[in-house]
Amino acid sequence: MNCERTAKLLFLSLLASLQLVGQNVKLAVASIKAVEPFGCFMRPTISPSGRWSISCASVKYLIRIAYGVQDDEILSLPQWAVSDHYAVDALFDLSGSMDAAAEKAGLQQLLSERFGLKIHREAREQKVMILRVANSGIKLKPRGESPASSISGSAGYLGGTMSLSTLATLLGTLAGERIVDQTGLSGEYGVELSWTPDAYRSGAGPGGATLAPPPPPPPPPGVHIKSGAAHIIDTNGPSLDTALREQLGLRIQASKLPLPVLVVDLVQRPLPN
């Protein structure tokens, strides 16, 4: 699949996600309170009856869930929409089930009504990393040839059974890069990958010290990832690119693609409850 076709498919995917899906959803009531972000764990609780709550989330994270996009796909947000955090407790009237489509539709309404969110979409050329099969050939075992397992990850580690598109998305989240899958391979594979993030390499920190690992970022919307057992980072271990080639038979390559983005035209601090 060439870069132009990949960009087109990504853009069409975003266009679809931006429609107010699940039109059987209506915001009934919502409580929004400012909270301190310290020790913040951004993970929503959802009930079949239509209640949606999260104890701590930035507006940027709410947009991520509502539109199914990643952090670097959201442009022109004011700093407070990234740094300020809120506890949200919302109830939606449903004529159907509280599925992923209903969740997106409800949160889009909440962002519009309570935060005054207005957006538009466009394609902009972005620096990305392309995930491809290495010259040595893929070293992953397809699902069925290896035991299936839940996805788990932390700084410098990712494991579980997943598709390569999910692998690219999660690696991008953990590594802080935009990674696009162009392997051309479908299906799911057993993944076990360990690498040393650049920030943790010996001599990377101030005065030559290795930086303390930050908490892992929240997972992309629609992907459930659990924290695995404590992962000891080898400060002299392989880079992500080297680990991919040696452990999985994959490689990443820098490129530029016209990719879909959300541009925020207006967003305001939440209206009073």
Image: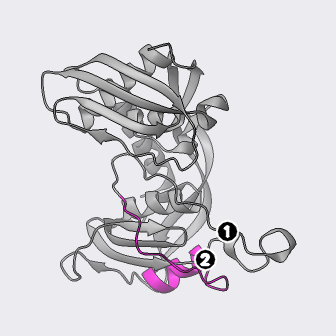
- How many residues crowd mark 2 within 10 Å: few (<14), some (14–19), many (20+)? many
Identify residue for label 1.
212
* Image depth: mark 1 or mark 2 in front: 1
Identify the residue at horizontal 67%, vertical 86% (top origin): 236
Q: Position of residue 199 (x, y in %)?
A: 69, 68
**In the picture shown, does residue 263 fall above or below 220?**
above
Q: Residue furthest right?
A: 207
Specify whether 61 is left or right of 139.
right
Q: CA distance from mark 1 to mark 2?
A: 13 Å
**Label 1 with label 2: CB-CB less than 8 Å:** no
Near-viewer residue (133 or 62): 62
Where is residue 196, by image quadrant?
bottom right
Identify the residue at horizontal 33%, vertical 47% (top origin): 222
Identify the residue at horizontal 39%, vertical 81% (top origin): 138
Q: Position of residue 141 (x, y in %)?
A: 29, 81
Instruction: Give the residue type that dot 2 points to.
Output: Thr
Give the main secondary structure of the magenta stretch: loop
Q: Is residue 247 magenta?
A: yes
Specify whether 61 is left or right of 95.
right
**In the picture shown, does residue 181 fall above or below 197?**
above
Identify residue for label 2.
196
Instruction: Give the residue type that dot 1 points to.
Output: Ala
Instruction: Label 1: state its secondary structure.
Output: loop
**In the picture shown, does residue 115 fall above or below 2?**
above
Q: Quarter of the image containing the N terminus?
A: bottom left
Identify the residue at horizontal 46%, vertical 49% (top origin): 41
Where is residue 241, by image quadrant?
bottom right
- How many residues crowd mark 1 within 10 Å: few (<14), some (14–19), many (20+)? few
Image: magenta residue range: 225-249
The answer to whether residue 181 of the structure is visible from this angle is no
